[in-house]
Image (tube, helix red, strand yellow):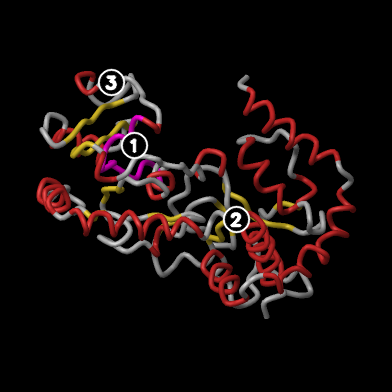
Amino acid sequence: MSKNKLLYYTRNILVRLVPKRLYENALQQKLASIHDFDKAVLLDRVNYYNKLETVTPLGENARALKDLKMFERPKAYNFDTFEYTRYFSRAFKANFIFGDVVHTEAFPTIQKSRPLSEANSNAVLLKLNKKRHFVFVKDKKKFAAKKNKLIGRNAVKQEHRIRFMNLYFDHPLCDLGQINKEGGNIKWLKPKIPIAAHLDFKFILSLEGNDVATNLKWIMSSNSIAVMPKPKHETWFMEGRLVPDFHYILIKDDFSDLEEKLNYYMENDAAAQAIVANANQYVQQFLNKKQEDMISLLVLQKYFYYTGQADTYELL
């Protein structure tokens, strides 16, 4: 086990050993610091993640918080959930779906991802599996010093990723590779490369997998640009708020305009660097740990309030 992973597990185990009542008693103290933040920002983001507006039944399969076990799989989701649910009554109940979620349940459910649609109110987002998904970088290489190519290293299993590789694997503007040894096409197989090697390129492919594109967050924190179709799913990163050709380079769902879009931004350096700056600015809102914690607690408090369990909700 790596040192980082050992520290991650150790920290989460120690957190679990603290008596639950101490966390529950600390909730009001935590929420009292709400005045340290811009209330409009809190309200906006909490309402984005949790769209419940009326008291809504939980259904018969909701689980009491006390029934969530320490090493229940998947562990990363379990740990990230407990980081915030520990502050609420163990008798409170919730529906959880852990993993890559691309649908909305009939009852209010806490999940990592959801489809981008008008009918996703029951899908309440928390910042889950963040050790994998919320990775940001400090990129010292300037955009102008990077290679004029699109880099892509992906697990190529889904139909849309296979279609992209069929179209562009041998294209001179692309350096693409498949990292999975099963599925896809063996002729596309290339070794994994670290994030730092991706950052040698101006353009980085960001295709959704089972739900969102995992690499989008670190790309947008770098001095390179994400190239992708319009997102169909979203997480705590609020992918639904990203503006095409402002935060990322938009390509069509059939990928037919990739060469045209790459050539345009290769020839229009100012437009490309504006996207880098806009993406970097977007990422900033996720870097304030205290604010992220406050929003997470408020998302849950709102969830418990609108499922008829909590007596108060701070932002009402």
The residue positioned 45% from the left and 54% from the top of the image is 103
Between disc 3 and disc 2, the foreground one is 3
Indicate the position of residue 229 as horizontal and vertical percent values: 26, 52
Residue at 32% of width from left, 54% of height from top? 276
267 or 11, nearer to the observer: 267
Tell me the residue at 77%/51% (across/down): 86
Amino acid marked by disc 3: Lys
Q: Earlier in the sequence, mark 1 or mark 3?
A: 3
Dot 3 corresponds to which residue? 190
Three-letter amino acid code at disc 2? Ile
- Amino acid type, callout 1: Leu
**Based on the displayed image, in which of its 4 quarters is residue 182 positioned?**
top left
Quadrant of the rendered image containing residue 145: top left
Evaluate if marks 2 and 1 touch, with contact meaning CB atoms under 8 Å apart: no
On the image, numbered disc 1 is attached to which residue? 199
Q: Earlier in the sequence, mark 2 or mark 1?
A: 2
| In the depicted structure, whether residue 140 falls above or below residue 176 | below
Q: Which residue is mark 2?
A: 110
| Structural distance between the alpha carbons of marks 3 and 2 | 37 Å
- Left or right: residue 44 versus residue 259 is right
- The part of the chain drawn in magenta is 197-213
* Label 1 residue SS: loop
Q: Which mark is residue 215?
A: none
